[in-house]
Amino acid sequence: LAPKRLVGRRVVLTAGPTFEAIDPVRGITNSSSGRMGFALARACRQAGAEVVLVAGPCAQPTPLGVERVDVTGARDMREAVLAALPGSDVFIGVAAVADYRPAAAQEHKIKKSGAAMTLELLPNPDILAEVAARDDAPLCVGFAAESRDLDRHAEAKRVAKRLALVVGNLVQDGLGTEDNQVTLYDEQGAHPLARASKDVVAREIVARIAALLAH
Ligand code: C5P
């Protein structure tokens, strides 16, 4: 049985992709299975935490004992996170949030013509950076999926977003796969973990979070 490292703690997570509507049948999204975020929600629950999981559209089953809030776009995800945040000790942003959304979603399906088409995009809110910048911010954890220079980008992200912990991986090592090879970045430096299943990786992340909460 997993040690109950998070008893009495409230954890809010985001997971999965977001979907930004263009019209009733089309949209912009990111490829994310939701597996890592759901594994982490399960590990937090098994460690004794009260867990709220704000999930974008994905096909993962809800872990036992986890409160799940389903959302679509980044702005809905932000609202759900802010609503769940009061009283939380930890916020973990695992979601692959779309960086941009269409300036206006069309009410009716856009008809094709032979002409070129331009779609105006607006930047989405950075949910994790906003939560971490609050005066009453919980301990904040982010993910960095990079295609190269992982150490540099992950550490830069940790400092820029004011995070206690960043979980970094090279996209070629973990996207859409069953297992993952990640490195944990905190104030003490970089800690590479062995390649393992997402459940095992999630338990190691929980252990690190519990250690950070303790000091
Ligand atoms: O800056 P980048 O998108 O690479 O940062 C990734 C981290 O920030 C992840 O933890 C992700 O969940 C979070 N994020 C967010 N809102 C965004 C973009 C990223 O919460 N709009």
Image: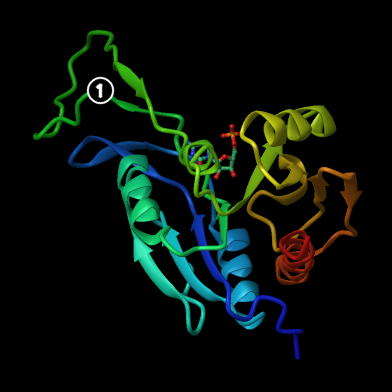
Q: Quadrant of the N terminus?
A: bottom right
Front in this rendered view, residue 52 or 55: 52
Q: Return the residue nearer the eye: 204 or 12.
A: 12
Give the image's coloring scheme: rainbow
| Amino acid under disc 1 | Ala
Could you tell me if residue 101 is visible in this image? yes
> Where, by quadrant of the figure, is residue 110 drawn?
top left
- Residue 121 horizontal/vertical position (percent): 33, 20
Q: Is residue 62 left or right of residue 102?
A: right
Can residue 59 be seen from the camera position used here?
no
| Ligand 1, image quadrant it occupies | top right
In this rendering, the answer to whether 138 lies above or below 120 is: below
Q: Dot 1 lies on which element?
A: loop
- Asked which quadrant contains residue 41, the reply is bottom right
Where is residue 16? Give x, y as percent: 49, 54
Above or below, comparing residue 182 to residue 20 in the picture: below
- Describe residue 116's horizontal placement relative to residue 154 as left or right: left
What residue do we see at 61% from left, 82% from top?
48
Q: Which residue is mark 1?
A: 103
Residue 60 appears at what percent x and percent y? 48, 68
Q: Residues within 10 Å of mark 1 (few under 14, many from 20)?
A: some
**Residue at (29% x, 12% y) in the render:** 118
Q: Is residue 97 left or right of residue 25?
A: right
